[in-house]
Image (spheres, coloured by chain):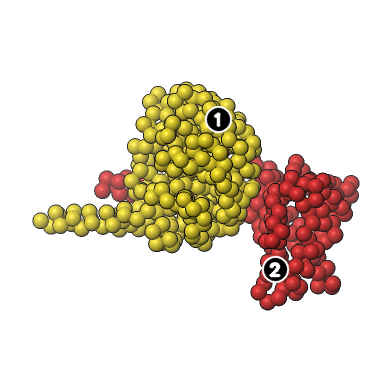
């Protein structure tokens, strides 16, 4: 009873108004349906160093150790100054048609994120086609309180969504034209 | 007579409500806490709290549950009534980035680690008034107390240390170097030992909480986040966030017995009171998973709201 009373008192005086921004990990999932069998789609994306073959903004993507865990691919973007990013393979699941990787040494000028890891998976849609799922987990580019607009959660989400969407849509085009 | 009868009825309702074991899973993406009945294995309630809830701490007895909301810089206090239903009793502002949260063993104090200000806020559990602020290392995260309620342990993620604070006089007794980026921790009465997950060095520090020094470093997989140990100390379970796996360690030899794939981004982890199941929140897959402690097989998966974290003591009673 005493407990109930003290809680009632808190309700009366609790007011939460001011805005604050704590460090919240962001999650983004994008998918595309492709009218081709899983194996066919997996063949296009399965190699960790194949990103440049299907992603429209990647000029090259050589990897140090192929599809071995720990392999590092260097992505050169099709942009002024040939900006580069490095990503390391965290896990590789041939049977499950999936791999998981993380970005090394984040550069917020290229992609405004931090602690970024990503999964790509090709799934059977049950109708003879494939669903490709690309998902990411990351923090915004500036993890301090009240970041600048270009380094906040919205900016991080918009940037990652742009990468996934352009890649998946282009993958669909490539796969379905084969 | 009437009073006695009322007391009896309330008593019966209370014991019924306390009979089941509940898990409180913070659902960061949807600003809520899922209340999972472990016996029925279903979500029985979803409680709206502050923005982007992450940390959770169930008070001894299970009548109060405290949740940290990093994005609204607040703590929500949830009350569990005699009928078993929940209500949010209060939401109060705490610091700038509340994340790790714990209740002391008497249920009187709530500790809130502030990621941005490098403080631990000490709140009165009943009134939620701030009693004091403790200076710790950089970006404090996991918090726990010793069972005798004499010491507070805080993992300082950006300082690679563990702060030990004397709860009788609030003095910092030691700052113990551990692995890189310590985050979740677990007080194991066998030893006793304090298990600390070091996110960036992909290992677990085993710390002597009495002698206040690291006694062992155990390699696990990438980005270990939380640790849970069985009551007898025989098995330790570590969530490896970036490896999407759980490392199962022998609590005696520290050998890795198995690495389990249960879901993507496993985070909060605890052993159920029955000691037969390990419970894990998988942030990326939006599932709450139960693993059999003996067979190490996943025995149940439950869909929960987006971004489950369950960082802290999420089980009641």
Which residue in the protein does label 1 denote?
A: B216
Chain coloured yellow: which letter? B
Residue B248 image position (x, y, % from top left): 54, 45
Question: Residue B142, position in %: x, y?
Answer: 51, 38
Q: Residue furthest bottom?
A: A127
For mark 1, give the secondary structure: strand
Is residue A13 among what the camera can see? Answer: no
Q: Kindly indicate the quadrant of the structure image that contains residue A92.
A: bottom right
Please tell me which residue is depicted at 49% across the width and 60% down the height of the picture: B300
Q: Chain of mark 2?
A: A
Q: Residues within 10 Å of mark 1 (few under 14, many from 20)?
A: few
State whether residue B202 appears in this view: yes
In the image, B175 versus A92, the foreground residue is A92
- Residue B170's place in the image compared with A169, above or below, is above
Q: How many marks?
A: 2
Labels 2 and 1 positioned on one and the same chain: no
Picture residue at 74% right of the left edge, 54% below the top:
A159
**How far is disc 2 from disc 1 in space, using C-alphas?**
45 Å
Left or right position of B293 against B15: right
- Residue depicted at 63% across the width and 55% down the height: A27
Give how far across and how far down residue B202 sits, in percent: 63, 39
Q: Outermost residue toward the right?
A: A81
Looking at the rendered structure, which numbered label has been put on residue A131? 2
Using residue B167 as the reference point, say whether residue A113 is left or right of it: right
Q: Position of residue B256 (x, y in %)?
A: 57, 42
């Amino acid at each position: 009873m005493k407990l109930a009373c003290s809680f009632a008192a808190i309700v009366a005086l609790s007011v939460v108004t001011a805005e604050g921004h704590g460090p919240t990990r962001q999650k983004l999932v994008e998918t595309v349906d492709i009218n081709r069998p899983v194996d066919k789609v997996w063949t296009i994306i399965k190699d960790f160093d194949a990103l440049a073959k299907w992603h429209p903004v990647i000029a090259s993507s050589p990897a140090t150790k192929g599809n071995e865990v720990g392999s590092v691919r260097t992505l050169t973007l099709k942009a002024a100054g040939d900006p580069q990013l490095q990503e390391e393979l965290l896990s590789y699941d041939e049977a499950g048609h999936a791999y998981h990787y993380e970005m090394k040494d984040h550069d917020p000028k290229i992609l405004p994120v931090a602690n970024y890891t990503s999964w790509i998976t090709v799934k059977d849609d049950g109708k003879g086609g494939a669903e490709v799922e690309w998902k990411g987990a990351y923090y915004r580019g500036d993890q301090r309180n009240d970041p600048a607009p270009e380094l906040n959660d919205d900016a991080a989400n918009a940037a990652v969504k742009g990468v996934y969407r352009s890649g998946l849509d282009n993958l669909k085009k490539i796969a379905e034209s084969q | 007579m009437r009073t006695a009868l009322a007391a009896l009825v309330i008593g019966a309702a209370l014991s019924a409500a306390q009979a089941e074991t509940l898990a409180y899973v913070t659902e960061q993406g949807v600003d809520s806490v899922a209340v999972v009945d472990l016996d029925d294995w279903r979500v029985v309630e979803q409680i709206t709290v502050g923005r982007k809830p992450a940390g959770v701490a169930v008070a001894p007895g299970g009548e109060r549950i405290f949740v940290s909301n990093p994005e609204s810089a607040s703590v929500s206090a949830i009350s569990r009534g005699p009928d078993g239903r929940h209500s949010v009793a209060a939401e109060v502002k705490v610091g700038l980035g509340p994340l790790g949260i714990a209740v002391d063993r008497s249920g009187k104090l709530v500790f809130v680690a502030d990621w941005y200000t490098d403080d631990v806020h000490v709140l009165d559990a009943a009134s939620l008034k701030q009693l004091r602020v403790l200076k710790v290392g950089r970006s404090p995260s996991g918090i726990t107390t010793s069972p005798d309620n004499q010491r507070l342990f805080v993992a300082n993620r950006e300082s690679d240390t563990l702060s030990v604070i004397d709860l009788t006089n609030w003095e910092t007794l030691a700052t113990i170097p551990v692995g890189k980026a310590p985050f979740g921790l677990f007080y194991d009465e066998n030893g006793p030992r304090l298990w600390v997950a070091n996110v960036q060095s992909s290992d677990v520090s085993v710390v002597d909480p009495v002698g206040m020094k690291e006694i062992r470093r155990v390699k696990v997989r990438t980005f270990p986040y939380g640790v849970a140990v069985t009551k007898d100390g025989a098995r330790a379970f570590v969530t490896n966030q970036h490896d999407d796996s759980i490392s199962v360690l022998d609590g005696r030899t520290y050998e890795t017995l198995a690495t389990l794939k249960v879901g993507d981004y496993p985070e909060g982890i605890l052993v159920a009171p029955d000691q037969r199941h390990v419970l894990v929140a998988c942030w990326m897959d939006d599932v709450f998973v139960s693993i059999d402690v003996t067979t190490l097989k996943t025995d149940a998966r439950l869909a929960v709201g987006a971004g489950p974290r369950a960082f802290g003591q999420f089980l009641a009673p």
